[in-house]
Amino acid sequence: MPQRPRDLHPERSARERLGAEIRRWRVLRRLSQDQLGARVHISGDLISKLEKGQRVCKQQYAADMDAVLETGGAISALLSPLQADVDKPPRDVDNSLISSVGTPLGAWMGGTLEVPRSTFDWNEFSTMLRRNFLAAASAATGALLPLASASSVTAVPATVRSADIDQINTAATTLRSWDNLYGGAGAVRDTARVQVQWAANLLGADCPPPLRGGLFTAVSGLAAAVGSSAFDAFAHDDAQRYFAFATLCAEEADNWPSRAVSYNLRSRHATWRGDPDTGLTLAELGLIRADRLSPAERSMLHNARARALAKMGKTQQALAAIGESDDSFAGLVPANEGPWMAYYDSAQHHGDTGHALFDLALLGHPPRSALLRLQTAVDTHTAGYARSRTFSRTKLASLRMATGDPAEAVADGRIALAEAAQLRSLRAKHELDELRGLAQRHPELPDARDLREQISSMVTA
């Protein structure tokens, strides 16, 4: 029996009046929440939360729903009283809204830095809240991000110059290179903290209007790079904050490629942490206005969708997402891609799709395609992407251990073990630990026992 829809209370707040209006028109047009979400390029889960007044409705969402539901602008018309609610003092506003610039940033993220709000919540800031957030971020960055001590950070200039933006972009490029070559732990992460704090503090400096978009884009790219290092070092709460900050800066710059990169990272992080449903939502949010993205950027996000869907056990949908990724990748022209997508070559594409197919193979899907793609990634990754090559080689060994020739898996596993020993990457150790567990399926094979023991020594060191 279908579950009875939750009662709405439009009398309680402007947000709930708006939510009730969305539901009224949706039901009138005989659409489910998922169907409406698909037509306006957001998730059905977000439609549900908007109807219940649990999320702030963006102007673009309202305009799209007006168009799809043919309301004559009835939904958008309710945004004005909603904005009035946001602008009231906190005592007059729904408790989940924040409207004061003086509110500690840690509280905006869930009350403390140790208990952050979910990654998905970050995308639902109203225009007013985002403006307040960014104003507070420039004045109190330390309340938002787990940064270095103030004594270790060089003072920012009073006025932003082009050279300052170039410095941030160079730092991001360098950190991405170090992260790919060495892993995100150790000195890489310590250096990253100092760089991102300096860059975030620069948001509070006087910035000439022509430079403002470039500044926020550069800070977004640096925050994304630092978040990746934190992810690799298993500093997951830190990574979540950096990635969310990257999204906010990209949206403030109105930079769709930077926004896509941040959502890709947030999606992969959520999926890796065992929340593929949120991972799928974040990937699909990144694909909004895919016409503004390059082939590599679209392919990257379809891979994130595929990995989330594979973790959810949705085989056919995951395969379809891989097909969409392949189609986008086929149109890639390296010379037309931005420098932030330089990493996304054939090796990366085969590795990413191979990881999604790996999860499907463990669920019973034929492993041949996964084996071929992972082998291609291993064979074609350059020396500058040592960590990615190690990830793909370990997955290849694990899949062979689970479904193919365990002797060949041991050979691959030994090489992966030697490669991982050169990295400062907790994710690389985690992948090896998965291989160790699969090797237990072959207790009769002495080489598999030896590999398990070697991995145990490394991951517990």
Image (cartoon, helix red, strand yellow):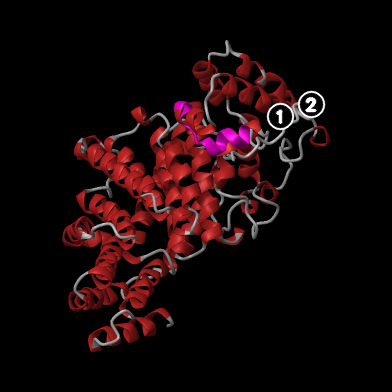
Q: Residue at 53% across / 53% down in the picture?
A: 240
Of residue 268 and residue 399, the one placed in the foreground of this image is: 399
- The residue lying furthest to the right in this view is 91
The magenta stretch spans residue 47: yes
Magenta-tinted stretch: 39-50
Q: Element at badge 2?
A: loop
Of residue 247 and residue 179, the one placed in the foreground of this image is: 247
The magenta stretch spans residue 197: no
Residue behind mark 2? 11
Of residue 74 and residue 385, the one placed in the foreground of this image is: 74
Q: Is residue 260 left or right of residue 300?
A: right
Residue behind mark 1? 16
Q: Which amino acid type is shown beneath numbered disc 2?
A: Glu
Residue 48 horizontal/vertical position (percent)? 60, 35
Q: Residue at 50% across / 33% down in the picture?
A: 34
Q: Is residue 453 left or right of residue 312?
A: left
Mark 1, other Cα within 10 Å: few <14 / some 14–19 / many ≥20: many
Residue 85 horizontal/vertical position (percent)? 75, 27
Quarter of the figure with the C terminus: bottom left
